[in-house]
Image (spheres, grey):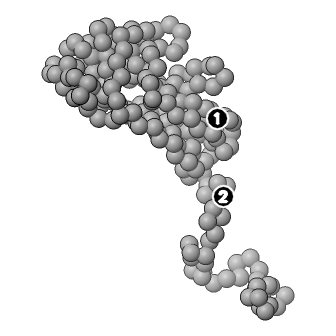
């Protein structure tokens, strides 16, 4: 077929691979034209972020038995709606935690909730050293396969004893907040 250009500028007759290398640049690609399937395996399809800027306190000591353990950390939850049931979610939870007493532990947990079922994704424990502003910066990261639908990810906090804090030093006041806590969810193409 011959290549033709009609009066409105439409080109016909070009076969696949018929354009010279380098002729199509990013400006020529329409917005949102590259679909998830074209991005390929490992592409980040969406990012959901929640940031907690205040202090959370608990005296809950539940760290065994049936899940969920500890207390829900207010305002440290995020929902993600999957674009494909086979894709994965990379969940990153970053917090500063402490206990009101030196050498006591604070426990941070990450869960996924769907249809009333709490799925434990992981946890971390940190012992508080001495000092009024002493904290432990902790990270939980998990690659999860939640399936189709909308899923809620959230943090929970528990104390070995005494009082545990998220976002505040051992004996600091609520005005001496230390760092924000973040929960980041990324849908990863499979």
Tell me what residue is drawn at x 66 percent, y 23 percent.
Answer: 115
Label 2 packing within 10 angstroms: few (<14), some (14-19), many (20+): few
In the rendered image, residue 98, in percent from the top left (x then y), is placed at 27, 21
Is residue 15 among the parts visible in the rendering?
A: yes
Q: Quadrant of residue 55?
A: top left
Check the image and name the residue furthest to the front: 175
Give the residue number, with chain letter if any, for mark 1: 150
Q: Earlier in the sequence, mark 1 or mark 2?
A: 2
Give the SS element for disc 1: strand
138 or 76, which is in the foreground?
76
In the rendered image, residue 124, in percent from the top left (x then y), is placed at 38, 23
Disc number at residue 35?
A: 2
Check the image and name the residue furthest to the left: 131
Tell me what residue is drawn at x 64 percent, y 34 percent.
Answer: 150
In the rendered image, residue 175, in percent from the top left (x then y), is placed at 23, 28
84 or 154, which is in the foreground?
154
152 or 15, which is in the foreground?
152
Is residue 42 among the parts visible in the rendering?
A: no
Foreground mark, 1 or 2, reads 1
Check the image and name the residue furthest to the right: 1
Tell me what residue is drawn at x 31 percent, y 16 percent.
Answer: 164
Q: Is residue 101 above or below residue 189?
A: above
Q: Is residue 184 above or below residue 38?
A: above
Q: Quadrant of residue 83?
A: top right
Q: Is residue 10 left or right of residue 75?
A: right
Mark-to-mark CA distance, 1 and 2: 20 Å
Q: Is residue 163 left or right of residue 76?
A: left
Give the SS element for disc 2: loop
């Amino acid at each position: 077929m011959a290549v033709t250009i009609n009066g409105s500028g439409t080109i016909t007759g070009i076969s696949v691979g018929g354009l010279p290398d380098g002729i199509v640049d990013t400006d020529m690609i329409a917005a949102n034209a590259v679909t998830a399937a074209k991005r390929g395996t490992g592409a980040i399809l969406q990012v959901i972020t929640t940031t907690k800027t205040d202090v959370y306190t608990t005296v809950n000591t539940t760290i065994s038995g049936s899940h969920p353990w500890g207390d829900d950390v207010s305002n440290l939850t995020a929902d993600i709606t999957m674009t494909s049931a086979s894709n994965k979610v990379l969940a990153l939870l970053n917090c500063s935690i402490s206990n009101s007493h030196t050498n006591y532990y604070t426990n941070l947990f990450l869960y996924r909730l769907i249809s009333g079922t709490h799925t434990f994704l992981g946890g971390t424990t940190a012992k508080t050293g001495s000092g009024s502003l002493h904290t432990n910066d902790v990270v939980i990261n998990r690659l999860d396969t939640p399936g189709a639908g909308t899923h809620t990810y959230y943090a929970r906090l528990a104390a070995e004893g005494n009082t545990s804090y998220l976002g505040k030093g051992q004996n600091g006041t609520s005005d001496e907040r230390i760092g924000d806590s973040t929960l980041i969810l990324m849908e990863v193409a499979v």
